Structure formats: structure tokens, C-alpha cells
Amino acid sequence: MKFEDVFFSREERYSIGIEKESGRHYLSIPVTNHMIDYEEYYEISESDYNIFLSDPAAAVNFAKQCKRREKDALLIVKPGDLRGVAS
């Protein structure tokens, strides 16, 4: 998979982009465990992608839900046994 960010918020700690091989849109958040820092990618619709790019407040709300693990059904890559926590 080739995730390409088109927008990121350093303050709110999320990115928005397109997975190049499938064309799926995503919002990602940084996570960490005791071994590594990595990103979790949550699939979003093209409509949400456009809304989030034009309305960062909507994206922040979605990112917060991801950080609380309320959007796990949308994870593009399912986490392993050592799932990290939002950083």
C-alpha cells in the first residue's frame, strides 16, 4: 500500500490522503507502542475527504473518534496484538 498524505495537521495530529494503489481515501492518526511509532489509517468516503479538507473542525472531530477507537471498523490495516495508543 502506498499512502500519500495531501494534508496534515501538526497541531491536531492527523493526516488526510489517498492510498495510491486502491484509490481509497483515508484519515490517519499517529500511534505508539513500546516498540514503534506508526500510523493507523481509517477509510473515509470521497465525500468525507472533501468535507474534511474544506472543514478542518469536522476532521478533528473524526480524528478524536479514531483516537478513542470508535471508528475501528474503518481501519484499512487491522492492528496486531501490540496495538499502540494514540500519541
Image: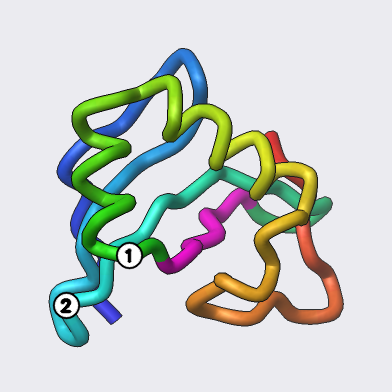
Q: For this rendering, which residue is in front, 87 or 48?
A: 48
Please state the extent of the stretch shown in magenta in the rendering.
Answer: 37-43
Q: Earlier in the sequence, mark 2 or mark 1?
A: 2
Residue type at tag 2: Gly
Type of secondary structure dominating the magenta stretch? strand
Residue type at tag 1: Ser
Which quadrant of the structure image shows residue 20? Answer: bottom left
* Residue at the spot of label 2: 23
Where the C terminus falls, by quadrant? top right
* Residue at the spot of label 1: 45
Looking at the rendered structure, the secondary structure element under dot 1 is loop
| Residue at left offset 44%, top offset 30% | 58
Looking at the rendered structure, the secondary structure element under dot 2 is loop
Crowdedness near tag 2: few (<14), some (14–19) or many (≥20) residues, C-alpha within 10 Å? few
Does residue 30 lie above or below 12 as drawn? below
Residue at the far bottom in the pictured view: 22
Please state the horizontal and vertical placement of residue 15, each as a whole percent of the image: 36, 41
Please state the horizontal and vertical placement of residue 67, each as a whole percent of the image: 70, 43
